[in-house]
Amino acid sequence: MTITLERPVTTTDPLTLLDTEVADRLTLRITTDHPDIDQATARRIVGQTAAFVAASGQQPGQSLAPSRLVDIGWHTFILHTVDYTTFCEQVVGRFVHHVPTTDGEEPPDNGETRQRTLAAITAAGYTIDPELWPDVADCSQCHAGCTDSPNSGTK
């Protein structure tokens, strides 16, 4: 399947999608839980997580996936349920579900999924931090594949 997305004329720093207090809280949680990640990198992860979630909500059914670093941000954000729910409602207009692949299901193709995800983020108008997107997550706690739900509009 080929997806053609138009590129916006300008891009927005996705960190501006988040309230400063929320961004600070998520940054602190990432550096606390992952001492190998410095504060500046954690802040960048938070911004790219916001872009990923926002783009995922605008592209339901596309099975977008975070990079390994952005996945850290997504898991952190989800654990802050009030902040995550508020973000989804205000930025996307609905909740963006996190749906792991099931046992025995093939993980998403790294190259195609990465390309599709970055295209969706760009099309949504958000700046991509390329250093944080060298791959697509292969997270064991999600049975080797975190994606947005293709049925995120349903409950």
Image (cartoon, helix red, strand yellow):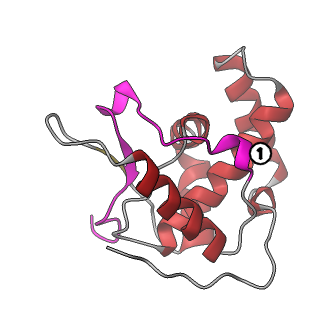
User: Which residue is pictured at 62% across the width and 70% down the height?
Assistant: 91
Is 137 included in the stretch rendered in magenta? yes
Give whichever of 118, 46 is nearer the camera. Answer: 118
Question: In the image, what residue type sits under mark 1?
Answer: Ala
Res 86 visible:
no
Mark 1 falls on what kind of element? helix
Q: Which residues are magenta?
A: 129-155
Give whichever of 82, 133 is nearer the camera. Answer: 133
User: Which residue is pictured at 58% across the width and 61% down the height?
Assistant: 118
Left or right of 113? Residue 80 is right
Please state, as top left, top right, bottom left or bottom right, where the C terminus lies in the image.
Answer: bottom left
Residue 10 position, x and y percent, is 81, 79
Q: Which residue is mark 1?
A: 23
Left or right of 37? Residue 83 is left
Q: Is residue 24 above or below residue 6?
A: above
User: Which residue is pictured at 55% across the width and 63% down the height?
Assistant: 88
Residue 58 position, x and y percent, is 50, 74
